[in-house]
Image (cartoon, rainbow, N blue to C red):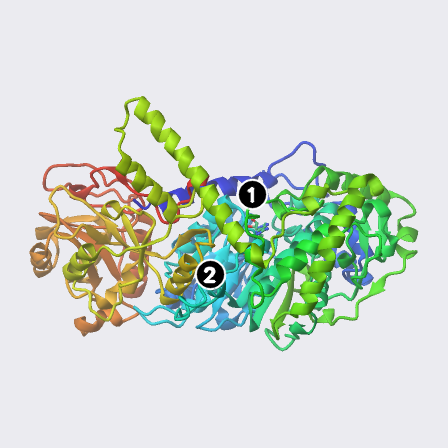
Amino acid sequence: MGGGRKRGRSQRRHFKQERENVWKDNPRRPPASAGEGGEGNGWQPFATENLAFEAYYKGQQIVPEEEWDAFMSMLRKPLPAAFRINASCQFYQDICSQLENDFRKSLESEVSDDHEKEAIRPLAWYPGNLAWHLNFSRMQLRRNQALESFHEFLKQENEVGNITRQEAVSMVPPLFLNVQPDHHILDMCAAPGSKTFQLLEMIHQSTKPGVLPTAMVVANDVDVQRCNLLIHQTKRMCTANLIVTNHEAQNFPGCSLAKFCPEACAESKLQRLEFDRILCDVPCSGDGTARKAPDMWRTWNIGMGNGLHRLQVEIAMRGIGLLKVGGRMVYSTCSMNPVENEAVVGEILRRCGDSVELLDVSNELPELIRRPGLKTWKVRDRASWLGSHNDVLHYRKNAILPSMFPSGKGTTDSCTAGGSVEVNINAVDADMNESGDMVEGKEETKIATSDSNNGDNANTEEMKQDESESVKVSRGSDEKTDSASIVTEHSDLPLHRCMRIIPHDQNSGAFFIAVLQKLSPLNESLVVEVMKGERSTSKDKASKCSNGQGSDTVPAEEISVQQPGVDDTHVLVEQQNRDMDTEISKDKSSEEAKVVAGEVQNDQATRRDKRKTQNQGRWRGVDPVIFFKDEATIRSIVSFYGIKDSFTLEGHLVTRNPDTNHVKRIYYVSKSVKEVLDLNLKVGERLKITSLGLKIFERQSSKEGSPCTFRLSSEGLPLLLPYITKQILYASAIDFQHLLQYRIIKFPDFVDVKFGEQASALLQGCCVVILREGHEDLESIGMDPSAIAVVCWKGKTNLCVMVTPMDGRELLERISFRFGLKIPKLDDGKPDLKCDDGSDEQPDGGAETVDPDCVPESKASEDMDISDVKDTE
Ligand SMILES: C[S@@+](CC[C@H](N)C(=O)[O-])C[C@H]1O[C@@H](n2cnc3c(N)ncnc32)[C@H](O)[C@@H]1O
């Protein structure tokens, strides 16, 4: 049980280890100059130097010459840590008050920077004082003894989801989305999920207990491992309004009923998957994170940004296609490079014409210091600066695209069609011809680009070569003439409306943000013309290139990646079915092998069932999403907990296990998510869903039995609490504290004898214990957002609390803070008391502890967590 959480933590550890490596000493790196970047004893400072980087940004005039030293010097300093309070969490006000009244004062003497007066302070530009700036880096927090209790506080609150530790500037893009409570939001490149979490905070912020927001978030990432990090992150939010998908963002599927069943589905609420808000936080070179991830100094090279430009345009254009008319899309990167930023925005504007506007948001977040986007820049390729596409050597024209330059104009002999064709096809508006449909079957296809790849593996051989050549040049004496002698272009587009956040303006990292609004459907004739023209020319050009007319060519077969037209959909569906059949026959042969080995009976029915199961889920390696409709089970749950009719279960319960007799976990989805799922089923499961919904019920068997086989889950309790009328107990502060502290308490051992008797009188099985302190009217406690409740198990002789040790510790601390109770130091969740049957068997070690009376009988039979993705295992 709690598999998702446990697994998430270990993955996170793995992820952390990767990040930590950059701080370790590497004999290949020269030491940093004294005083730069070093943070204390034992720490191996980094060489915060990269000549190619300096030459590049100096050449781009990223800051005025007189600011260059301040810019570089700030980039070399460790980044101050920051975090955000989750305003939708139950203890939000307690946390604010703890920060304001306790830590802000107690840490006063820890100011370590001459420019800072306070050790911690709210970020002025973040609404509601929800985001805080620390005057310490993450490293200092870890090492400074005086900060220990504050560090512990941050770790614990972060773990349970009450705060999120996140770089300050990374919190900016979601703010410019202007999210409203009913919005459908897409986060296209979402992992590891800090901005997704922020979006979820926004949609949950003003909801009442037991009521779900109408908004929803689809969080997507191409990388399965990173999707799992995202799932781990967002689990802390306990939301029923999130779907996690695993697609290439540039090929994010279009789901339109008009295509699949125009008449039969006319009544469906949701006809097409499109979004009010889209966050397009694309993979980038990441050089704006140098203060946090100093490995950048070692790895940065010019090829990183150049190589990502095409993919960034593709992703952004797909975003525009999926955006509703009137909707907003924020394009952002943590890179300072104009080729990844202004050039991409410029290309979107050129492609979309009057359909998209780059918004002037200078009146939003006025306290945030930012600089206008550039209108002039140049491109660096290997050893040369290039002012326009005319300057690009013929054999490099496939890698250095016209769209990288301010004018976006190319030369007639460009071999750049591969990228352009794909971008244009993907750019087709969702209103018109569903670009996702057209690129069906490309899900795992590598894009036909020479330089395009994601930010995680940008360091290709070619890029390394670029790096060494550019270093050579930047060291050379002709650097200045090289840069100065070229004629640069100037963009006519209003790119000054883009925003660049520069580290030395407000002691932060760097970020780039552009806010786009879709004004009308994309111009069909234009897009179709471009598609037709470019598709044919692309093949010509591809063959030209592969005929050796360009020496740096993309293979022809890659350039002419199949781009099925609108009418090809049925072919694709058939192809999918064929793929599925192949899977089934593979499966069949392994079944047969087992038969030969005498492992299974030659049972046709089993095979048929298996086939049915496989057909229910389209995506290989991902369990299907199935609406849970087992009425007998639902009735027994409703009756056992006395769930009021006003809580709609019908149509909102899903599982990933097609075998309803063995479902272990049942998840709740919001109305908005339900509508998307309905749509997805009708269009043939185009979305590859790796996680969704809020775990609400979980199968629980016990030695002693219970009238209800499903227990409540801690995550689902806040949603369900206002609607539960049975199996409830109201505890005094001291008994509640003891429960959290000792975890298992025999009925006669409760301080309040009456409480012990009431507990003993409950039906055997799952129950809810609510802290009654501070509440006059017990009837309405469940509706009170400040009510504190935990899921427990009522055994034969005792009551056992079912929360994770971490959540238990957090609750104890919150109670002590609120009611001024003294909390003794706890051991890590090991019950002091033994069960009445003499067993000292420990709870099953999952994320949640259970009564030793009721340890699940077979762990092996547990089904997968809804967030599990088989191909990661
Ligand atoms: C800058 S990070 C996103 C950070 C994230 N928005 C956050 O705030 O936590 C870029 C992400 O894009 C993902 N990515 C790279 N190429 C992608 C693609 N073609 N489609 C979707 N995601 C992609 C990477 O796996 C990475 O997780």
Q: Quadrant of the C terminus?
A: top left
| Displayed quadrant of residue 520 | bottom right
Residue at figure coordinates x 63%, y 42% from the top left: 457
* x, y percent for residue 694: 34, 57
* x, y percent for residue 598: 28, 23
Dot 2 falls on a residue whose secondary structure is helix
| Displayed quadrant of residue 614 | top left
Q: Is 767 left or right of 620, judged from the image as shown?
A: left
Q: Amino acid at mark 2?
A: Phe
Residue at figure coordinates x 39%, y 45% from the top left: 868
Q: Is 663 left or right of 123, judged from the image as shown?
A: left
* x, y percent for residue 245: 47, 53
838 is higher (above) or lower (below) than 682: above
Residue at figure coordinates x 17%, y 71% from the top left: 778
| Displayed quadrant of residue 486 | bottom right
Q: Are marks 1 and 2 in contact (CB under 8 Å)?
A: no
Dot 1 falls on a residue whose secondary structure is helix
Q: Is residue 522 visible?
A: yes
Q: Is residue 191 visible?
A: no
Q: Amino acid at mark 1?
A: Arg
Count of number-bearing discs: 2
Q: Which residue is mark 2?
A: 260
Residue at figure coordinates x 31%, y 21% from the top left: 597
Q: Is 673 left or right of 499, judged from the image as shown?
A: left
The image's mark for residue 19 is 1
The image's mark for residue 865 is none
Sooner in the amino-acid sequence: mark 1 or mark 2: 1
Give the alpha-carbon distance from disc 1 to disc 2, as whole Å. Answer: 45 Å
